[in-house]
Amino acid sequence: MNYYHHFVIPFTAGLLFLVIVVAAKWIGWIKNLDAEQKGLIKRNIFGKASLHATWEVITESLLHRRIFQKNFLLGYMHMSLAFGWFLLIVMGNLETRFFTHGQMNPPYVPIFFEFFEHDLSTLRYKEIFTFVMDFLLLFVLSGVALAYMKRATSKPLGMKKATKHAFIDKLALTSLWLIFPLRLAAESVTAGLYDSGGFFTRWLGEAIVSLPGADMLYYPLWWAYSISLGLFFISVPFTRYMHIPTETLLIFLRKYGIREKNEHTSYTQVELNACSRCGICIDSCQLSSELGISNSQSTYFLKSLRDKKTTDYLTETCMLCGRCDFACPVGIENSTIRLNQRRETPASAINFGYVPTIEASKGKIAFFAGCMGQLTPSVTKATLTLFNAAGVEYTHIDKDATICCGRPLQVNGEESAAKELAQKNKQLIEGTGAQALVTTCPICARIFAESYGLSIPVYHHTQFLYQLAASGQLKLTPTSNLITYHDPCELGRGLGIYEEPRELLKFAGNLVEVKSSKTDSLCCGGSLAITSINQQQRSQIAIKTLESIGANDVDFVATACPLCKKTFTAASDENAILDVSEILVKACTNSRQSLKPEQKQRTKETSTVN
Amino acid sequence: MIDFGFTPLVASITDLDKANVNLAKQLTEQDPSFALCISCGSCSATCTAGQFTKFSFRVMCHQIRKGNAKEAIAEASKCMLCGKCTLACPRNVNTRNIISLVRKAQTTTP
Amino acid sequence: MTKTVAIIGGGVAGLETAKQLNSLGYSVKLFEKTNTLGGHVAKWDRLFPNKRHASEVVSSLTLSQGNTQTLTETTVHSIKRENQGFVISANSSNHEADAVVLATGFELFPAEKKEEYGYGLFENVITSADLEQMFKKHGKPVMASGHKPVRIAFIHCVGSRDEKVNRPYCSKVCCVTAVKQAIEVKEALPNSEVFCFYMDLRTFGPGYEDLYKEAQSKGVTFIRGRLSESSEIEGGRVLIKAEDTLASTPLKMSVDIVVLMVGMSPLRSTNKLATDLGLSINADGFIAATDLHTNPTGTATNGVFVAGACTGPNNITDTVNAAKATALDVHNYLSR
Ligand SMILES: Cc1cc2nc3c(=O)[nH]c(=O)nc-3n(C[C@H](O)[C@H](O)[C@H](O)COP(=O)(O)OP(=O)(O)OC[C@H]3O[C@@H](n4cnc5c(N)ncnc54)[C@H](O)[C@@H]3O)c2cc1C
Ligand code: SF4
Ligand code: SF4
Ligand code: SF4
Ligand code: SF4
Ligand code: SF4
């Protein structure tokens, strides 16, 4: 059988264009990956990774599991559009295949099958097919209806800010929205005129053709349907809808082990094009929710980079807290891409020639308090008190002078300047002959672990103290205090350390778990990765974050970062904010002789008069 | 010229009639907290870079106000962006932001 | 029938208001939370500007109370308007009054909040209030170890003029207190070295500038720079860091005792009383007066008046003046 009509041209041309462009892009991206990344593909492509990737494509690209977890309606909308459409195509193909007994048909045939064949009486399982096809169409249309609704009011779907769209995006959006209503109209009119179709199209079709002149709509509707498909396909490579094919590629590359490096690679291009502009990152960003800065979030930044039009403002207006990385349903490494963009334009003159080489005494454990540590002596004192109690032989390597670890420079894109400082500190650390490096500051811990290339292990003090407590070297007896814990960004999302501080707090008192915690925890607002927000704005963020961890319902707010501690303390007069180590000291029951003589508490005038 | 036996030390006088204070104006616009410094010196006292070299955020700001943008920009290159000064400042001067803006001014100031 | 006035707070403000209203013939009830009268002044040793003993001031005020009914160890928890007057609940009993004067004073800035200064952490970091106690007990400062200090540093503006601890205002009395205490240290320990680290020296009152001059002539060194941080070194001594801003050089020095000149903070428990009564609180956290110039003792609520340091940092002279003015206002109100 030879099916053809001129109206199939827009669809077919569009599809051909889309396939060629997407293929060309994919090939280009893959070709431009670096040798290491290509090696990963070669090693993994014929292994389990591909199977896992396929599964993830089903659960994410089609079913949108992660979006479902965020918000049911939003998930349903994405799922009905993607999965429904997919099933329509699959079922359409099956239907055509069955009918033509396995004949190879041009791709437009299954799409316009209702036009070509009105008498399906020879089709096996005809009832099932026509029912399912109608059902699926309705399923997709319910998603389209939600999309209209989201456009009109973005609240019910949990999205506070619908992303802003450019003209070509609007064109694509309109054609996409028209596709399914037009298909419904075309199929219904056909069903009405020829007594074909399923339960719904037949019913609707009969209603339509009973109107005068409805039969004149027959050809125009099929043309319109085909044109809307064609327009949509042609617009895909130039719009956010490019994310649909790209997400699939991204999932495969990621399963092969490819990640962002410390500069942009061709993989970055894949990520940039995989952003669906769902806007979830806008909702997860405190710059937007607390400060009303709603034009710099990842989706905008990625778009600007994709269009090669990014600005300093977009590159710099981000705390690199990483919250949106974990919220992003596509799993785009937003903050790493932003950091790499910062690395593209370092300040021309930074000069650390003046920094001397520092030496410290030898010891088994090298302890580093960092710059912030000098402003939080209570944290240092508590940690060293616990070290003494557990009999740890340590050397406090930055007691007299600290060279900054370089992380603050790094997060501002000053990579080579950061390296200069790292070099100095590395000499200092290695000179002590220590077997491990411990720091109370997650900011330092992150760069020590990720960029220093040290030959000894790096521990955040909560990790190290946890080992001491778990092995019984540090004896802790729980108090009755209620404690809530704030996950510092650099420690939690940055280094993946969530459990050790919590376990330690459970040794010391009653830990209260809260909703926004771990990967979803809020930033204290003190981030060194943004300079443009002022102290009042930082405090605004901090107050909301304290609220989110239930600070007013507990005895102590615990954190594990001196900067978080400082930021919270500056923002709130009401809460007692302590480092995990300070809370442990209250619960420590090692024999007191090993402790440094505790300070005699002076009678404080404050407590007697007021 | 009549020789009075001494010469005024012109170079050491701040002449605000002639000084080019564009950078100061620009900074105040970009970050209003630039105007709020009370010269308490906490930033310089706590400064990580200042432990090893003669560098002071406070003095840098003064240089800018006096019209010595060039010196100030050269000074700004010494900062490690560690953030201690921001935490120390009693007037909430956004010190790191000002340093970053001064560094950028390297290329943009007239 | 004699009308009753309730005065909340038995510091110098409350005592002076009580004394005046008492002599005007009112029945006065004075509520005091602690077991002694005199408020903060009772904690001080000698007073600026003339180094007289604080106890003299307190006892002269307490002795001239006449018929005032003083209720010590009685904390006022709430005050409610009822009919034309007020009901004051204190220690689970109720008292009635026709007018109320809030003279609840201030609280000292909790110096632990300035963690980098080391109060509560390093044993030889003390507050100005702690030093007053030492003067009362020993007549001189002593180190935690019992040793005689040789070098002492006074740090001005701790918990004042500091937005990082939400106290942006000047506490007014601490500059001159530091100057006074520096002189006292010099007098008690002539061989000691005394340093004052200040941002601006605000010695505005009568005799204050003379005290400043006296301190200079006694060898006290004034350094213009604010402490950034301190750390503990051998022997419990303290290493402090500041910038000598006049020389534009960073400076560090080790001292035996660091004295933090803690500021006067709004007393948080007062805010509940005030807001219950419909009074407004100003941005600094103290009770706001109706008109800063022409009615500094009146409030937004009829029959409620304020006196003393609950309206903002003040010295004794200004506090007592305010108390007298308040008494007159109460009198005018009750004899309408
Ligand atoms: C370190 C330091 C040194 C100083 N030295 C001097 C000096 O030398 N010379 C000088 O002129 N000034 C000095 N001052 C200032 C002086 O202390 C104040 O001016 C004065 O204390 C203010 O008195 P007041 O009554 O308003 O407040 P307070 O002294 O604070 O008295 C308030 C009283 O109210 C009570 N109270 C509060 N709430 C309640 C309640 N709900 N129910 C019952 N009672 C309550 C309190 O217990 C307290 O007794 C100094 C201040 C400081 C911080
Ligand atoms: S970055 Fe992720 S969360 Fe943000 S719009 Fe794109 S896909 Fe959505
Ligand atoms: S990293 Fe944090 S601050 Fe930056 S865009 Fe994401 S959520 Fe916002
Ligand atoms: S951020 Fe720069 S100026 Fe500020 S303390 Fe650190 S090194 Fe000094
Ligand atoms: S700490 Fe702040 S107020 Fe003090 S000198 Fe530095 S910038 Fe100025
Ligand atoms: S009186 Fe002096 S020490 Fe007290 S806050 Fe004012 S300036 Fe600072």
Image: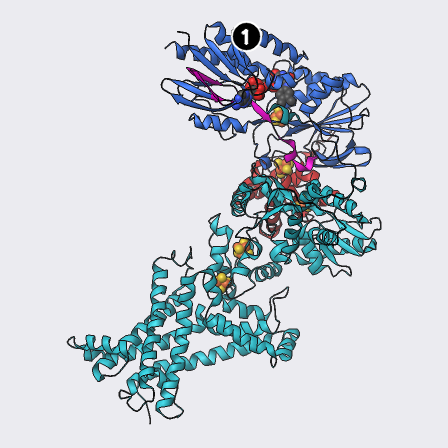
| Kind of residue at badge 1 | Gln
Q: Which residue is mark 1?
A: C65
Q: Which chain is red?
A: B
In the rendered image, which quarter contains the N terminus of chain A?
bottom left
| Residue A431 falls in image quadrant | bottom right
Q: Which chain is blue?
A: C
Find residue B33 and report its horizontal and vertical position in percent: 56, 40
Q: How is the image coloured?
A: by chain
Q: Is residue C260 above or below residue A584?
A: above
Determine if the magenta segment contains residue A64. Answer: no
Q: Tell me if I can see residue A227 in this picture.
A: yes
> On the rendered structure, is A176 left or right of C136?
left
Q: Which chain is cyan?
A: A
> On the rendered structure, is B31 left or right of C152?
left
Label 1 CB, ligand 1: below 8 Å? no
Q: Is residue A358 above or below residue C289?
A: below
> On the rendered structure, is C254 left or right of C171?
right
Find residue C129 and report its horizontal and vertical position in percent: 67, 23
Q: Residue at x 54, y 68 (%)?
A: A271
**Quick one: A244 or C109, which is closer to the camera?**
C109
> On the rendered structure, is C296 left or right of B71?
left
